[in-house]
Amino acid sequence: MHLLRFPLGSLAAALLVCCTVAVATLRAQSRKGVPPTAAQEELIRQGTNAHDSGDYNRAISLYRQVLAKNPDAVTAIYEMSYAFFEAKQFDSAVAYARHGLEYASDLEPLLYVTLGSSYDAQGKGEKAIETYASGLKKHPSFSLLHFNLGVTYFSRREGRLALASFKRALRLEPDHPGSHFWLGQTYQALGYRIPAALAFCRFLMLEPATQRSETAVRNIHGIIGTLVSVGGEAKNEIVLRPSDSLHLDEGDFRGLEIRLGMLIGTSRSMGLSKEDDAISWLDISQLVDGCGDSAIVAGHGFAATYYAPYFAQLEQHGFSEAFSKYALISTSDSNTVAWLKEHQDDIRSMFRWSAEYVWPR
């Protein structure tokens, strides 16, 4: 069965998985779905293939054939609503998602997602939030509902609420790339520099070679660049810019900021690097390596207790260089590509370790 097909490469794509409606507006879920026959399952399979290739009209046509013979096939109803969403026919997407929610089915949380996505796409953010809230009352452990609620809050510039939603999503599903990416975006928008960089780093472990990966690398580079400036009245003066006391609730990373700032500032003042140089694997390695030093990383916030221990253990297991180069795949740097080809065993070992890592709940 083909269900979770949510591209997450941009805010618009992320909003694709946002939806909602108050339960009070839906009819009681007293209807039972009818499983599709083998022939109908084949039509649904063809429909999802057409959907994935971008031929939404063909997908809709195939689902119509199923529903003409089996109007209670909830899978076809869900897929129809999703295809209408992708085709930007949001009124129809809403109608089918609401219809699907009349049934008791395992697809209920996904139908809430599609419904909310459609409302968001129509500019009905409040309805989307209500829908997610309704879905979460019934499915509090469905991580995508938390994630999509966070994206909606982010788009409405409600950063604190977005943070809370993304954190809940990650407690439930630590391997969801989009949650790390959008948590990083939110952290950065709110001025949490090292927490943002760590969220982007974790994202790059999961998704290193997409357009979003390029954005994450640029963001990390930009964050590191804000930690120091060189110049002023004294030509080689190094000015460090650690975080203020208002940004310590996610963890006290001022020691790490100072260490990174000194390393970067010294390199620039000696003419070994320039402000507009591309990010190097050493920049990321120094960020990761600092997470294991309790003298410069403190506090009890989410970033300090969720991300910092992960990267501290990554460094302790000897994977700092492997990760730092793997994270830069999207730059297509020839030296990085060559190193990765020569160190496939190191990369595989890193992935095995990461897969076994126990994330805090």
Image (tube, rainbow, N blue to C red):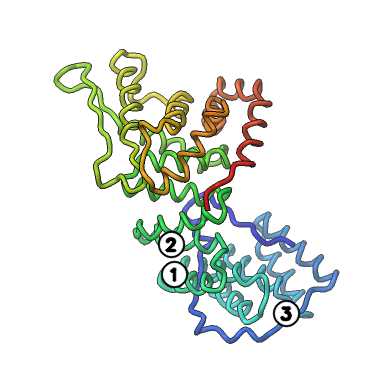
**Mark 1 near mark 2, Cβ–Cβ under 8 Å?**
yes
Question: Residue tagged by mark 2?
Answer: 152
Which corner quadrant holds the N terminus? bottom right
- The residue tagged 1 is 129
- Coordinates of residue 147 in the picture (x, y in percent): 50, 58
Say which label, 1 or 2, has the lower sequence index: 1
Residue occupying image coordinates x 47% and y 27%: 285
Q: Residue at x 54, y 27 (%)?
A: 325
Q: Say which amino acid is labelled 3.
A: Gly
Residue drawn at the location 14% of the way across and 20% of the way down? 233
**How many neighbours does mark 3 have within 10 angstroms: few (below 14), some (14-19), or many (20 or more)?**
some
Vertical placement of residue 266 versus 306, above or below: above
Query: Closer to the N terminus: mark 2 or mark 3?
Result: 3
Q: Is residue 137 visible in the rendered structure shown here? A: yes
Amino acid residing under circle 1: Ile
Q: Secondary structure at mark 3?
A: loop
